[in-house]
């Protein structure tokens, strides 16, 4: 079994957000919107794998969109 998380940079701080129902359940148990490293260690010790799911950044979308427009021209 595994959980999915997203790591976001918020004002220079890297925060770990749950990205699946099981990870959200763990954050609900912890009564937080994010998970800490200590939470992830505990979750891992319970037999869960932790997978980081990359989220597309707006800069990447803008770059992709401008590249796509250049290809059409």
Image: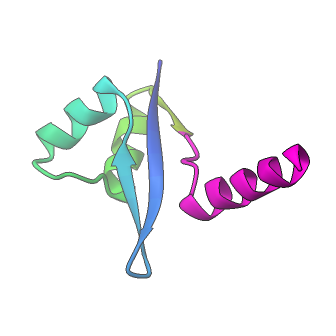
Horizontal side of 16 relative to 25 (left or right) equals: right
Q: Considering depth in this image, is 44 or 51 the residue closer to the camera?
A: 51
21 left or right of 49? Answer: left
**Residue range (magenta):** 52-73
Left or right position of 61 against 50: right
Residue furthest to the top: 1
Q: Residue furthest front?
A: 73
Judged by its main secondary structure, the magenta piece is helix
Image point (89%, 50%), residue name: 73
Q: Which x, y percent locates residue 33? A: 20, 51
Q: Nearer the viewer, residue 12 or 31?
A: 12
Whole-percent x and y of residue 16?
39, 55
Q: Is residue 47 magenta?
A: no
The verdict on residue 59 being magenta is yes
Identify the residue at image location x=47%, y=18%. Answer: 1
**The image quarter in which residue 15 lies:** bottom left
In-front residue for pair 31/71: 71
| 45 shown above or below 32 | above
Placement of 21 over or under 35, stated as above or below: above
Q: Residue at x 64, y 59 (%)?
A: 62
- Residue closer to the observer: 55 or 70: 70
Q: Position of residue 31 (x, y in %)?
A: 10, 48
Q: Position of residue 3 (x, y in %)?
A: 43, 30
């Amino acid at each position: 079994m595994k959980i999915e998380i997203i790591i976001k940079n918020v004002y220079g701080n890297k925060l770990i957000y749950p990205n699946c129902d099981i990870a959200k359940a763990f954050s609900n148990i912890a009564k937080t919107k994010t998970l800490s490293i200590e939470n992830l260690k505990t979750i891992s010790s319970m037999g869960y794998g932790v997978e980081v799911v990359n989220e597309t950044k707006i800069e990447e979308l803008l770059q992709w969109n401008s590249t796509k427009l250049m290809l059409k021209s």
